[in-house]
Image (cartoon, grey):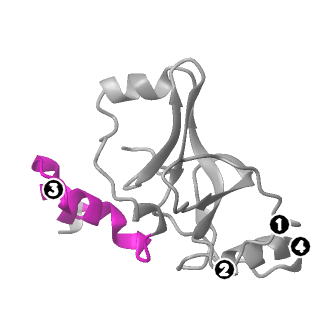
Amino acid sequence: MDDPNFSRTVILLLAHEDAEGSMGLVINRPGSTLDSPERSPLVEWISTSVGPRVEFIGGPVEESGYICLTQDLGSIAHVVSVDMMTDDPGADSIHRVFQGYSGWGPGQLSYELTENAWWVLQSEPTDAFDSDPFTLWSRVLARQTTELRKLADYPVDPTVN
């Protein structure tokens, strides 16, 4: 992918409807730490998140908004609204905070998939909360059973190899 927003990214697809569009989170792009007082609710949420304890860059869409992804120990996936100003993140909550998200218009992602612009790969339930997001892209490729596994060690810039 030539777009720098998506180069070597691992995206967790949250919603995919051809008629409405698609939404996902880049789960391997840590951002910066938050320490400014005006963002103190985010600081509390991030300080109790799984490491690394930074906000993650979820994608280039709606960069002023935040999504908190949590690992529910139940078997049913669901979305709930959280007020980060008043709700308590909970010390035992497994969660990660993302700034922005990745989005595609109606039919866009399906078209890009037919053009082989994306690889759809098997994931692990723990990928979204991985403690080493910097190497997640390579590790996801390495565990595949197809020829794609050979790309796990491919250099970012092959001209300097």
Query: Which residues lie in the magenta part?
Result: 130-157
Sequence-first tag of 2 and 1: 2
SS category of the residue bearing label 2: loop
Q: Are marks 3 and 2 in contact (CB under 8 Å)?
A: no
- Label 1 SS: loop
Q: Quadrant of the C terminus?
A: bottom left
Q: Residues within 10 Å of mark 3 (few under 14, many from 20)?
A: some
Q: In the structure shown, which secondary structural element does the residue marked by tag 3 occupy? A: helix
Residue 6: x percent and y percent? 45, 49
Mark sitting earlier along the chain (3/2): 2
Can see residue 116?
yes
Tell me which numbered mark, 2 or 4, is placed earlier along the sequence. 4
Give the number of marks.
4
Residue 156 visible: no
Residue identified by numbered label 4: 38
Q: What crowding class fits label 4: few (fewer than 14 Cα within 10 Å), some (14-19), or many (20 or more)?
A: few
Please tell me which residue is depicted at 59% across the width and 67% down the height of the picture: 96
Pointer 1: what residue? Answer: 87
Res 48 label: 2
Q: Are marks 3 and 1 in contact (CB under 8 Å)?
A: no
Nearer to us: label 2 or label 4 = 2
Q: Quadrant of residue 3?
A: top left
Name the residue tied to disc 3.
149
x, y percentage for residue 64? 76, 53
Residue 71 higher or lower than 92, as above or below: above
Q: Earlier in the sequence, mark 4 or mark 3?
A: 4
